Image: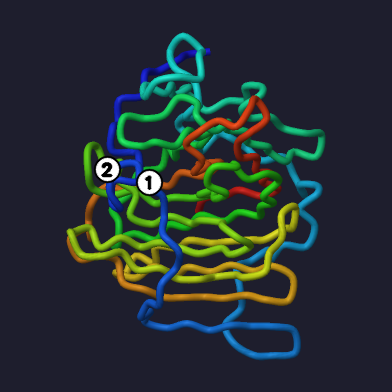
Amino acid sequence: MMRLKWIAAATGVLALGVGVSMAAPAAANPVRSATTRAGGSGTAGPAGAAKDAGRATSPISLSSWDGLLLPVNSAGQPTGNDAELLGPAQLISPWLTQDSSGALTFWAPSGAATTPGSLHSRTELESADKYAVGTAKHALDATVRILQLPQSNPEICVAQLHAGGSGGSSPFVMVDYKSGKLYVMVASGTSAPADFYTLLTGVPLDTAFSYRVTDSGNGTLTLSAASGDQSQTYTVAVPKVLVGASGHFSAGDYQQGTVSEGADDGGKVQFTTLTQS
């Protein structure tokens, strides 16, 4: 097992201000959006819409993930702002485990080790697949259940698309769950405010939902999600200043709590599908 020291300080929520979690969704102006409910019409949600998040249809592979960011420092302690990155990505209890069906469960306690650019600890996979944002097609698909939220700030980011910043590490797309809502922040890449897009509402804890973030390779992003009888899709522009920049996905449990309320306080997320294409 090889441990690599995490030095990408910009991996925190720098697009929103250092250490600041995602705000409540505000109205946005997408290129196109559509909603589908049972008996209705509209744009279909992501492929493989959530049906049963209790078991994976096949084991989730870690082969396309370059590393796993941990909520502990180089000494294995859950303190400080020098969180460790395991490379290559691999299972390590209790942070990332895999059950007999192949599902992955991520655990990240509140108030544990962070990166220099964030106040929030995480257990998060970093993609090995780097590509030119806005010019090449690339997609991240997942089926997820939020099992537990942190107490001090009950919110978890389950996916990010990074581009720009130090080594292409600044997140400009963040998929976030809070108060039963799944929404996406798309930063401008400048000092202008970010846009927010609500994908799902009324999704309780321990309930399956699927999401897909697609860079279409033509200067647009498609953001979609589905749970039960609801689905939503938005098509939005890639920020012009980021077109052609080196980008990569991350996915997992970027819990937004900052203060520990006890050993059991933190975020827990289970993925039953997780693929890049």
The picture places residue 43, in percent across and down from the top left corner, at 57, 82
The picture places residue 258, in percent across and down from the top left corner, at 47, 36
Nearer the observer, 124 or 263? 263
Amino acid type at circle 2 is Gly
Please give the label number shown on residue 168: 2
- Looking at the rendered structure, the secondary structure element under dot 1 is strand
The picture places residue 164, in percent across and down from the top left corner, at 23, 48
Q: Is residue 212 left or right of residue 128?
A: right
Amino acid type at circle 1 is His
Nearer the observer, 240 or 27? 27
Q: Is residue 191 left or right of residue 233?
A: left
Q: Residue at x 39, y 36 (%)?
A: 119
Q: Quadrant of residue 50?
A: bottom right
Please give the label number shown on residue 25: none
Between marks 2 and 1, how big is the CA–CA gap?
Answer: 8 Å
Q: Residue at x 18, y 59 (%)?
A: 190
- Neighbour tally class for label 1: few under 14, some 14-19, many 20 plus, Cα within 10 Å: many
Q: Residue at x 58, y 61 (%)?
A: 211
The picture places residue 78, in percent across and down from the top left corner, at 51, 19
- Looking at the rendered structure, the secondary structure element under dot 2 is helix
Please give the label number shown on residue 248: 1
As drawn, the residue found furthest toward the top would be 75
> Badges 2 and 1: C-beta atoms under 8 Å apart?
yes
